[in-house]
Structure formats: structure tokens, C-alpha cells
Image (cartoon, rainbow, N blue to C red):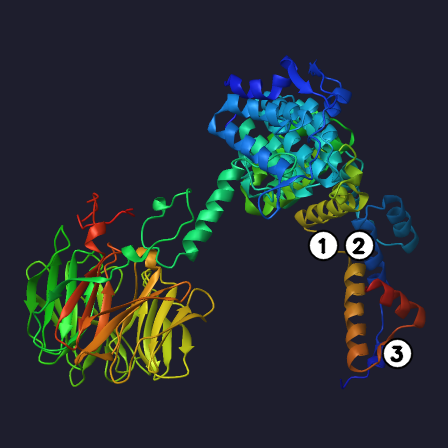
Amino acid sequence: MDVDPRHYEQIAIKDIDIHNIVLSYLVHNCYRETLESFVACTGMPEPADYIEDMEKRKGIIRCALEGNALKAIELTEQVACGLLENNKDLHFDLLSLHFADLVCAKKCTEALEFAQNKLTPFGKEKNYVEKLKDFMALLAYEEPEKSPVFRLIGLEYRQDVADKLNRAILAHTNLPSYTAIERLIQQATVVRQSLNQDHGWGSTIFSDGFSRRLDSGSD
Amino acid sequence: MVCDLDDDEPALKRLKLASGNLTVLSNGSSLTEPIVGSSRDLMARPLQSEGDKEVIGLKGVIKKVEFVRIIAEALYSLGYKKSYAHLEEESGIPLHSSAVDIFTQQILDGSWDESVATLHNIGLEDESIVKSATFLILEQKFFELLDGDKTMEALKTLRTEITPLSIHYCRVQELSSCIVSPTHCDSVGSSDLGYGRTKSRAKLLEEVQKVLPPAVIIPENRLEHLVEQVLTLQRDACIYHNSLDKEMSLYSDHHCGKDLIPSRTLQILKAHSDEVWFLQFSHNGKYLASSSNDQSAIIWEIDVNGGVSLKHRLSGHQKPVSSVSWSPDDHQLLTCGVEEVVRRWDVSSGECLQIYEKVGLGLVSCGWFPDGKWVFSGVNDKSICMWELNGKEVECCKGQRTLKISDLEITSDGKQIISKCRENALLLLDKEAKVERVIEENQTITSFSLSRDNRFLLVSLLDQEIHLWSIDGDVRLVAMYKGHKRSRFVIRSCFGGHEEAFIASGSEDSKVQRCTRNSEVYLWHRRSGELVEALSGHSGAVNCVSWNPENPHMLASGSDDHTIRIWGVNALHMKHKSAHCNGIHYCNGGT
């Protein structure tokens, strides 16, 4: 590489760019109060319509995370009409969340009916068959957390779905579905790896603490 | 044991103990034991009588208890219920323990929970067997509940009884899917346990019986199975065996005499005016085709009595005719002149329908594709050429494919062509898969032929050996046959007899007997390699043999002495004329 990586020190950064990065992160994660105080502190122009949409989105995501997947679906339809129609994977994921909730609540009859009415239609398509089977298997266990498919009722899976939903709604309203900071960290990691590999220069670019964090983060 | 749910008999067998049977105790007194439900009672009756180490038979390897039990099972399966009951009584050896009897009945009655409980009383040591059997039973319970629309009960069974067994996780998953979508159930047959929707209770019993150790529940028809094994072994060991298996009797060890091996000259056919080089029966056994150095081929007809008569003489070749080939439907015949042309003839009229040739080259062998639509031929430029029936050339496999040998075979699925590609090697060419396999011998190959089931190749070699190769899967040598003489000429060999259990080959002059030259036809038992017969009669080298595919007792041989001999079995044994498909004499295993 001909360019000396230490040239980065010559580049000037504008405050407004940094503010926007932080802003995008806060918007993405619906941190309304933080957003409001940040905007106030930095004297940025207030992004008025952001707040309302954020609140709605926050509500939807919270429903999904807290075991109210049906409500999440309903609200999504209100905020982003047709989103789920065009995103069958997501639709299936949300419905299956509800199913999982019913199973955990030991409401077997309801779970069974729900599965028969709402989930099995997806089974006509090949790519849903395996997933459907996995979910149906939950029914067989009195203690689903001890079954081979326990991850389907776990928090991680739920967060994963909520995350997908969040990104889908953002995309639908023409906002970026990935925050600027996420992208920046991803890019930095790739650059660092590449420099390390080819030239052993990684450590010259970032401060030690940050490098270490990038290392552990890029696992 | 076909246990019909409507049939009272099984109930009688299984519960007969309950109606008060006599048990003779060791002190000579007898008591009537009504069997009721408690598990202690179920265990009370010992499974075997005293002396269960007792052996019978000359070699002392048969355990008496096992012997009696399989006889009892055989009696029961044959339907001789009273004899079966008497046997149990007289021998004091019950076919099954009382727990097993009760278990069996509970399965047939559909008392699932009770049967699972009884299962634990049978005294099985292996926990995993108990679990497997329990799984099978509960699965049946599950499916029967689903069938009766008792979905929630089925779900409960799954959750509380089946899943806790902690085995067959994949199956558990499928059962879950079955509850949710019944249509999915129908395709559930691909599970590792291998069965689909609700089976009959009798079938369930069968499957449970397979899981349980055979000493606990004797496998059905065990005695029949053992006897069949023995018959098969005897038949395979019998080197003269040349008739239907249903001839085998249990009264004495199977041992055929030579009387069903063709050994007598029945007819001498003298229509050729020079050496006979090639012979072949048609697929349906009704015709024989021969070809000769006299540049002609002859189609012979075989009548209902096995008599052979000349049907057509096929003239037209300008060179000796080295081989013939019957069409798959036997309506047409191909003949090949030595490095000349191939002619196609109509069998019923004797007319020549088509000539196949390659300008400037000579053809050396011929054959039909199994669909009868194409013919193929070896060319003396070492390629193999294929034509449609009307003479239009379709394809030509160039390269070192075939040497000047008149053998060219194709498997009956049309996929592989076999030809001699080098002096000591055969090429097995799969046209579609473009795969070539080679059989290599350590000396020159003079001729070869393919078995009817396409699995074996018989290869005749220069040094008087005939090798049998298996070509199914890996190519390997499986047997060798020796004894015949070969020094100067191409001698052919073939498969034949009932189920192609024999190998036949021609031979050159062997003995000088009373100033006449004598060449023989050699017959070997294929599996054992033993020489069975050497048939004398020809006074010149026997070049070719063919065994009638529809009549294992008819063999034909062609010789340098210009004649064809038809060989058959001894007339004394030709007692019956059975209704064979073409009316040819078929000898039953006479006494």
C-alpha cells in the first residue's frame, strides 16, 4: 500500500457529522429522552417528525419483545402498511413468536389452533417447512426449555426478530436500516484486519484500547 | 400369526391359561391356575421347564426347549391350535411366558397403558429395548387417538408419555407436526423408524415382536425359515441341479443325479456343408440359428416334442458367417460375414431385409440394442458402429474398441457395450455415463459371453481356461473352469441350464478312440466349478455351444465335422409333458 495510513491524522472532522452519527444511533434504537437532551445540548435543529415515528416504532418493538407479537403485527400494519405482506419471512417470524409464547404459557389448545390456522399455510413453501417443523416440535415438550429446539423460545431469538422488524420498519419509511456507527465500526474492522494481515500496521491506526475492543468485537 | 381382531382363536390361545389349565408341579400334584391381573401372578409361572439346558440331536447342539418352542410356533401358525395346546401341555414348555401372552392380547385389544405396564413384567434386561417397544406402542396409541379426532388427548400422550422416553427425537418432532397438519402425516413414512400413518394392531404386534429378543417372542414362521435355509444350501451344493426348486423334498437330502443334465445326443443336424462356427437359440427357445464356413446360416425350428427341423437356409453372404444375433423379439436375425457385411433377416419368411456395411471396411460382429430399434457392429478398423434398422448410420465409436473378434455384447438395459479391445482385455463401455471399465486377463481372450442377468461375463482364454467375471459393481474374477482342450481354434462357451447354473464349452480333439477323433462338449457346475459332464460324439472340434434358455434340458453344439448335435436328457426320465410355454418336453424330477 502506497498511502501511509497515518495520513488519517490530517483529515478534519466536522462536529455536525459526529452529531449526525450519534443521532442516527439514538433514532435507530428509539432512545427518545436521550435524543431530546442531546439535541438540546448540541443545539441541533430538532428533527420533529422523528420523535413521533420513533415512539410508534418503540411501541411495536416492545410488544414483540414482551410477548405480544400479535399486537406488534397489528401496529406494524398501521405504521407501515403492506410491510409484512412483502416480507413473509418476517411475518412468519412474528407469528411464530406468538406461537412460542402460547406454548410457554402452556396454552396447548390455543397454540395448536393458532398453528393450524396461521402457521401451516406457510408450510406450502419449501423454505418454511423446516422452520415450521422445528416450531411444531415445541408442542411435544412439557418443558420446552429442555427440548432440542429451546433456542426458539429464548431471548436471543426474540431479540433477533425484533431487530429484524425494527430494520424493516425503518427501511419502509425510507430511513437507513443500519446506523452509521454500525457501518463505521464494520468498515474499520475490515480495514484493520486487512492492514494487520498484509502489513502489520493495524496497531498504528487506532489507539491501543480501541484496537483491543475491535479485536474482541470482530470475533 | 395372523391375529384377526374378530377371530376368537388368538384370545383362546392367549387367555387359555385363565380358563384353568393344568400345571403339573414337581411333586406330581396338579393345580388349576386361574391367571388374574396381579403382576406377581404373571411372574409366578416359569418360562421353561426344568432341564432347560437339555440338548437333543446327534451333535448335541440343539437345545430341547428351543426346539419344542419353534415346533409349537409352527403348529400354531399352521392353524393346528389343539395340537399346539397339547404340545405345550405334554412338554411342559410353554411357547411364551404368561406375561408375553397377556402383553400380546393387550396390544391387540388396544389396552395401551396396560400393555406398557406388562412390558415391564416380561423380564427384559435391556432398558433400551423396553423403551423402543414402549415407543412403538405409544405411537400407535397416539395415531389411533388422532384418527378418532381426539387431538388434545393425542397431544397429551405425546407430551407426557412419548417425549419423556427421550429417544427418537426426530420422530417426536414429526409426531408434533402430525398433530398440527394431518396431511403432513402421510409423508411421514420417511422417518428413521420407517413407517407412516396408523398401522393395524397386528402390524404393530409384528414390529414389537421384532424389537423384543427372539427368545422372549419367537419370530413368526421360524421353523419354516430354518427349513428354507437348509433347502437353499442343499440346492446350491447340488452340482447336478437342473430343475425347478419345487422338486426339492424334505424327506431326503437334496442330491440330484445326473439324469437331468443333457447327456444324450437326441439329434444330429447335417445341413451345413462346412464347419459350423456359431450357434444360438432364440430367446423364446423355439428356434436355433447356426452359421458356418459354408457362407450360409440356417434357422432351425424346434417343435413341441423337442424335434429340430430346418426352417430356412439364409444364403447371400460371400464370406463365412462368423456369428448370428437374435432380435429381442426373436422375429429377426442378424448374421455377420467375416470382415464383410451384416445382414438382417426376417425369421418367418427367411427374407433378407437389410444389409449393413461400411464402405472399404469389413464388419466382424453384430448385435441388437435391447429396444430392437438399432443394431450395432464391430468393424475391422477397431471401431463400433451403430445403425437404425433402415440402414441409417447413427453413431460410430472410434478408437481401440474392438478387435477382430466376433463377440460383441450389450447389456439388456442397453447401457453397456462389451467388446474385446486388446488381445487380453475386454472393454465395458458405458456410452451414457462415458465410463469405461476394463477386464484384463493375463493371456489372449478368444471369446466371451454375457449372462442373462447382465452380472457376469464368461471369458474363454487361449490356454484352455474359462474365467467367470462378476461385472456388477466392481469387476472381479469369481471362478475358473478347466478340463477342456483348446489349441488352435476359437472355442466358445456359454451359460445355461436352470437359472444359468451351468457353464458349457466346446473343445478340440481330445482322445483318439478306436481310430476316430473325438471332441467333447464340456459342462461345469457354475458355482462349484466342478466338471459335470464331457459329452462325446462330435468327430471334429466343437466350436460353439448354446443352451436353450427356455428348456434347461436342451443343449446344442456345432462342430468342425459340419454337424450340429442336439443334446438332451435320458429318455427314460421323460415321463411327463408339462404345459410349458412352447410345448417343449420338460422333465420333472422323476424317480
For badge 3, the amino acid type reads Thr
Q: Residues within 10 Å of mark 2 (few under 14, many from 20)?
A: some
Q: Tally the marks.
A: 3
Residue B373 in the figure: left or right of residue B77: left
Q: Are marks 1 and 2 in contact (CB under 8 Å)?
A: yes
Q: Nearer the viewer, residue B544 or B135?
A: B544
Q: Quick check: B401 above or below B495?
A: below
The chain under label 1 reads: A
**Which mark, by number, is residue B410?**
none
Residue that badge 2 annotates:
A24
The chain under label 2 reads: A
Q: Nearer the viewer, residue B181 or B378?
A: B378
Q: Are marks 2 and 3 in contact (CB under 8 Å)?
A: no
- Residue at horizontal 15 percent and vertical 69 percent from the top: B564
**Which mark, by number, is residue A176?**
1
Q: Quadrant of residue A118?
A: top right
Q: Quadrant of residue B241?
A: bottom left
Secondary structure category for the residue under label 1: loop
Secondary structure category for the residue under label 3: helix
- Residue at horizontal 67 percent and vertical 23 percent from the top: B153
Give the distance between the C-alpha atoms of the residues marked 2 and 3, in whole angstroms: 29 Å
**Which label's residue is closer to the chain start, 2 or 3?**
2
Secondary structure category for the residue under label 2: helix
**Which mark, by number, is residue A204?**
3
Q: Quadrant of residue A113?
A: top right
On the question of residue B376 being in view, the answer is no
